[in-house]
Amino acid sequence: VIFPPLPEQRRIADILSTVEEQIQLTDKLIDETRELKKGLSNDLFLNGVGHDNHKNIQLGPKQFEIPQEWQIKQISEVCDDIIDYRGKTPPYSDSGIPHIRNFNIEENRLIMDDIDYVSEETYDEWMTRGIPQEGDVFFTTEAPLGKAALVPDFQFSLAQRLVVLQPGDEITGEWLMYLLTSDFMKEYYHTRATGSTVKGLSNRALQKVK
């Protein structure tokens, strides 16, 4: 190992220790901010802004109150389409068009790490069940269930364990993304999930989620 004289060792260690303390404080602040966002999201999605009258609704085994004038519908009623390519895996290429998989979706963001690619020929043969558009919503249907992000403005192919929801005129992609990742909605659609080892939602079950 390399080492300078003891006084310089201590100075270097003190500098790195100070940086490490700042990292820990930043991590704590991030965790606290995430908890604040969770509480704020649940409050906004159930109470809205500036409403006095509320009504009871049933989501799975639980009841909630929402503003009187709000509506509740199934996903199939507010989405024009659910683009679903589950059931097969395309051949990969060294370069070409990005192939987005379930682990590329984090909480409300797309992570472009560890990306596989498909050729343009494979893309043309593969993407025959619908083409996602900017502003649509990625939704992971298993492993893990319940992460969502907005579809970006670039071409990609869609993997298994992942669908794209195309909102209709009554709902925005941003609203749907944040709603699907709220705690009370996650708890609700997990009650509709099936599977012995890995819990997931079928297309039919997802369509019926309120």
Image (cartoon, grey):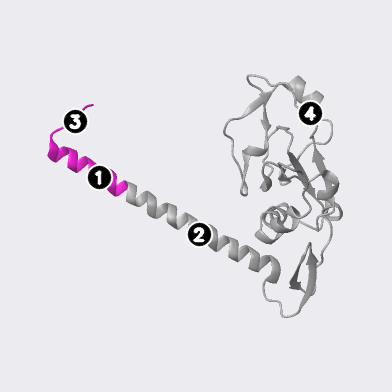
Between disc 2 and disc 4, the foreground one is 4
Q: CA distance from mark 4 to mark 1?
A: 52 Å
According to the picture, the residue beneath numbered tag 2 turns out to be: 33
Please give left or right for residue 114 compared with residue 75 in the image: left
Q: Earlier in the sequence, mark 3 or mark 1?
A: 3
According to the picture, the residue beneath numbered tag 4 turns out to be: 88
Q: Which residues are magenta?
A: 1-19
The disc placed on residue 60 is none
Q: CA distance from mark 3 to mark 2?
A: 40 Å
Q: CA distance from mark 2 to mark 4?
A: 39 Å
Please tell me whether residue 134 is drawn above or below residue 92 in the rendered image: below
Please tell me whether residue 46 is drawn above or below residue 149 in the rendered image: below
Label 1 SS: helix
According to the picture, the residue beneath numbered tag 1 turns out to be: 15
Is there CB contact under 8 Å for labels 3 and 1? no
Is there CB contact under 8 Å for labels 1 and 2? no
Label 1: few (<14), some (14–19) or many (≥20) C-alpha neighbours in 10 Å: few
According to the picture, the residue beneath numbered tag 3 turns out to be: 3
> Where, quadrant-wise, is the C terminus in this rendering?
bottom right
**Residue 170, image quadrant:** bottom right
- Residue 160 visible, this angle: yes
